[in-house]
Image: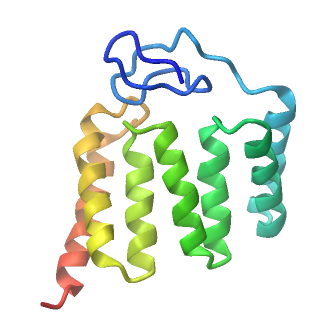
C-alpha cells in the first residue's frame, strides 16, 4: 500500500486522497470497468431490496479488487439489511483498514455494535469517529456528522445500566 507524501499514512491505490490529511494520492488508480460495473449492479440490487444479489456483486468486486472501499461499505449495508450484523462488522473493519483516517467506518461500526447490544464497543467506535471528523477530507458537513455522533453517544449513555 502506498504512503501519503504529506503525512506518511498508508493510502489505498484506489483512493484519490489520503484519508488522514486529504493530500492527493499520486499512486491513485481508478478501479477497472468490470469492478465499477459490479459496484453499480450491487447498488441497483440494494436499492431494489435484492440484498443477496447486492452481496454477490460486492463480493465479486472485492475478489477482483480488494482495495475498493465502496465495495466493503455497501457490502456491510447489504449484510446489515439482512440482519447479518456480526458479518457486517467484520466487513466494515476491513473497510476501516482501507481508510483508517475516515470517521465513516468508525461511525458505522458504532451503529452496528449498538444494534447487536454491545454498548462498550459502540461507544469506543463513536468516540473514535468523533476524533476523526475534523480531519476527514471526505466529510462535507462536519457539524452535522458531529451532531449525529454525539446523539448516538447520548443515547448510549441514557440506556447504559451500571
Q: Which residue appears at 44% of the width and 59% of the height?
A: 108
**102 relative to 11 in the view: left or right:** left
Q: Which image quarter: residue 143? A: top left
Residue 115 in percent (x, y) is at: 44, 78
Q: Which residue appears at 61% of the width and 62% of the height?
A: 77
Taking the view exactly as shown, the residue that stands out farthest to the bottom is: 161
Residue 61 in view in this figure: yes
Residue 128 in percent (x, y) is at: 27, 51
- Give the quarter of the figure containing the C terminus: bottom left
Q: Examine the rendered structure and indicate whether residue 67 appears above or below residue 96.
A: above
Q: Which residue appears at 54% of the width and 24% of the height?
A: 1
Colouring convention used in this rendered image of the protein: rainbow
Residue 8 in percent (x, y) is at: 35, 18
**132 relative to 79 in the view: left or right:** left
Q: Examine the rendered structure and indicate whether residue 152 appears above or below residue 39.
A: below
Residue 49 in view in this figure: no
Taking the view exactly as shown, the residue that stands out farthest to the left is: 162
**102 relative to 50 in the view: left or right:** left
Q: Nearer the viewer, residue 18 or 139?
A: 18
Residue 149 in percent (x, y) is at: 29, 59
Q: Which residue appears at 62% of the width and 75% of the height?
A: 84
**140 relative to 56 in the view: left or right:** left
Q: Nearer the viewer, residue 149 or 14?
A: 14
How many marks on residues?
A: 0
Taking the view exactly as shown, the residue that stands out farthest to the front is: 1
Amino acid at each position: 500500500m502506498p504512503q501519503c507524501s504529506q503525512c506518511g499514512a498508508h493510502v489505498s491505490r484506489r483512493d484519490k486522497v489520503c484519508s488522514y490529511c486529504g493530500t492527493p494520492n499520486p499512486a491513485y488508480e481508478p478501479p477497472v470497468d468490470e469492478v465499477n460495473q459490479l459496484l453499480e449492479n450491487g447498488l441497483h440490487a440494494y436499492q431494489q431490496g435484492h440484498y443477496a444479489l447486492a452481496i454477490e456483486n460486492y463480493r465479486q468486486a472485492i475478489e477482483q479488487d480488494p482495495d475498493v472501499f465502496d465495495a466493503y461499505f455497501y457490502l456491510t449495508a447489504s449484510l446489515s439489511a439482512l440482519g447479518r450484523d456480526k458479518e457486517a462488522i467484520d466487513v466494515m473493519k476491513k473497510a476501516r483498514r482501507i481508510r483508517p483516517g475516515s470517521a465513516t467506518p468508525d461511525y458505522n461500526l458504532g451503529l452496528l455494535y449498538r444494534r447487536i447490544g454491545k454498548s462498550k464497543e459502540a461507544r469506543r467506535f463513536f468516540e473514535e469517529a468523533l476524533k476523526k471528523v475534523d480531519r476527514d477530507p471526505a466529510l462535507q458537513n462536519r457539524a452535522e456528522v458531529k451532531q449525529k455522533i454525539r446523539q448516538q453517544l447520548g443515547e448510549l449513555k441514557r440506556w447504559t445500566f451500571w
